[in-house]
Image (cartoon, grey):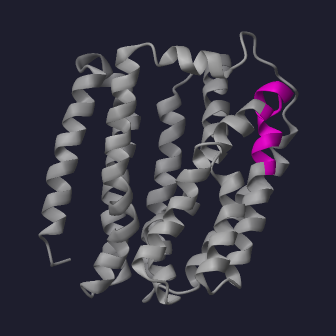
Amino acid sequence: FMFVGVTLPFLPVYYETLGIAPARIGLLLSVGPLFALVAPPLWGQVADRSGRPGLVLFALALGSLVGFGFLLTASTFEAVFACLALFSLFNAATTTVADSLAIGHVEQHGGSFAGIRSIGSAGFVISTLAFGFFVDAIDRRVVIVALALIATYTLWTGLTLARLPVHRRAGPRADLAGAASLLSNPQVRWLLVASAGHWIASAPYHGSLGIHFKALGFAPWALSLSASVAVTSEVLVFSTWSRWAHLVKPRTLLQLAFVVSAVRWAAMGLTTSP
């Protein structure tokens, strides 16, 4: 998530410095979500059937490292697109497999998934603030720093999680019939519609905020602070969830989050001051 803290806010701005038009930047930002439709189920099956999710996570990290490394020399839309396609083939499943490992750990040893997950969000805040206040302009340093972070977690995963013993979970394997049966539940269908609507709204926000800030003449630290405020809120929710989760229904919390998000984004659209 430290890697995400650098790439999510700053990478679209870097694409613009390469002379890539905004419409084409939108196409580049769609590569990851496109692969997210197929990569998590594919690699999830490999992790489940092998009983070695830690080793699969190491393979995903290694593939991500190679794919992202090619961005160091890519300077055209076509070259960047190819790099992101190779990178996303592996990276799109990384969070899914990591979450699966974390949930499995909690099942075996106790604790809280929210507590583990909050560490990832904290990493995002640390890296995005450090990078935004360290640089005075967005350039190839985005790729260099992000690549160093991928290399670090690839090495760490190889020395630790990749060595975990085989552990196959009991229960039925995931298949298309099981996925289809979920759609028979109207609450699941509505949840999917709500999730799709949320990401339709979020994708342009995440992809264009840095470009918007640059057009307004904001320094990189303004983008860092904007990104870190949102994720710091996430850390607070995760770290305190067990204390107040019983006080609010998940549906109510989702509705509140959607309303507040709409107000926040409308306000940012009307703001021209850091």
Decide: is 247 above or below 150: above
Viewer-side residue, 217 vs 188:
188
Viewer-side residue, 153 vs 97:
97
Which residue is at 61% across, 85% downward? 76
Magenta-span inclusion, residue 54: yes
The C terminus appears in which quarter of the rendering? Answer: bottom left
Magenta-span inclusion, residue 160: no
Which residue is at 50% across, 67% downward? 27
One can see residue 66 in this view? yes
Please give left or right for residue 168 compared with residue 234 in the image. Answer: right
The N terminus appears in which quarter of the rendering? Answer: bottom right
Viewer-side residue, 239 vs 207:
207
Please give left or right for residue 96 compared with residue 136 in the image. Answer: right
Q: Quadrant of residue 269?
A: bottom left
Q: What percent of the width, then of the height, locates residue 212?
A: 29, 77
Helix, strand or loop for the magenta stretch, by majority: helix
Image: magenta residue range: 46-59
Q: What percent of the width, then of the height, locates residue 81?
A: 62, 71
Please give left or right for residue 60 compared with residue 268 in the image. Answer: right
